[in-house]
Amino acid sequence: MDIVHIGKAKTVYRTEDAEEYIIEFRDDITAFNGKRKRTVPQKGYFNARISARLFQLLEQRGIATHYKGMVDDTRMLVKAVDIIPLEIIARNIAAGSLVRRYPFKEGKKFIPPLLVIDFKSDAYGDPMLNDDLIRALRLATEKELATIRELTLRVNTILKDHLNRRGLLLPDFKLEFGKGSDGKIIVADEISCDTCRLWLKDSGESVDKDVFRYERGDLITAYEEAAKRILS
Ligand code: UDP
């Protein structure tokens, strides 16, 4: 199969149908802009399953996503889209880069949630954007940006509710959007333990990529715990 794109943790393949791609969730994991790398057996499997479940949930709630089904345990059939090079980060609780870069205390709640938009660019180190930069770089029109913001807030409400009922807090997560051949903007990429912060409500323990970033124990034990709850 022709490769459309090889990312740090996923590979995107063309199919015979120009309207469909296949995304393979690999076992590779990276952090700190690729400086820390590892291959963790089964990571791709858990992220694929979690993403599939969460995309299905969004679809059930009327949010269009690229998800079409699973080909096997680690390969997802999706609508072919052009990814808009923006990383939309919704934050409900202060953590991660926000507490490193700004005087927020970890654990501070944001009501309403904070939305932060970064430039998806390894070459430039994913710098934070604002509306003027997005316009000047022609990354999205004002109307597209408004749609992206509104969809992200709706996704946040849906995910937060689903996760909270299963004993998980959602401090923050990252979304990417794609544009299909019809020009419609839909949720794309993945929603998984690699792209969400997930804390066990009872203990505050991380069951997400922070386990890898900060060497907080066994990654698969954490991802399995997250999957067990999210898929229940
Ligand atoms: N995130 C992501 N990809 C990125 C950057 C961030 O999926 O390239 C996710 C990350 O997993 C977390 C949220 O976005 O859930 C906010 O990340 P943050 O800005 O705090 O960065 P970090 O602490 O990971 O450096």
Image (cartoon, grey):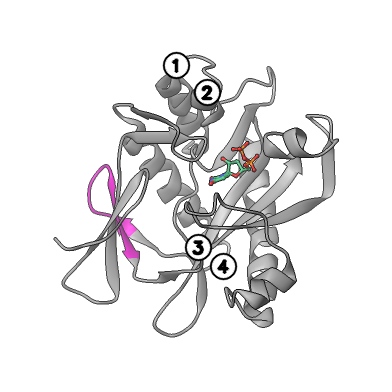
Query: Can you say whether 76 is above or below 165 in the image?
Result: below
The answer to which of 182 and 58 lies nearer the viewer is 182
Estimate the spatial distance between the alpha carbons at disc 3 and disc 2, rounded to whole Å: 29 Å
The answer to which of 52 and 181 lies nearer the viewer is 181
For badge 3, the amino acid type reads Glu
**Nearer the N terminus, badge 3 or badge 2?**
3
Residue 223: image x %, image y %?
A: 45, 28
Q: Which residues are magenta?
A: 69-78
User: Residue placed farthest to the front in the image?
Assistant: 124
Estimate the spatial distance between the alpha carbons at disc 1 and disc 3, rounded to whole Å: 32 Å
Q: Secondary structure at mark 4?
A: loop
For badge 4, the amino acid type reads Gly
User: Residue placed farthest to the bottom in the image?
Assistant: 182
* Front position among marks 1 and 4: 1
Q: Are marks 2 and 1 in contact (CB under 8 Å)?
A: yes
Give the labeled residue for mark 2: 211
Q: Are marks 3 and 4 in contact (CB under 8 Å)?
A: yes
Q: Residues within 10 Å of mark 1 (few under 14, many from 20)?
A: few
For badge 2, the amino acid type reads Val
Q: Is mark 3 within 8 Å of ligand 1?
A: no
Residue 224: image x %, image y %?
A: 43, 26
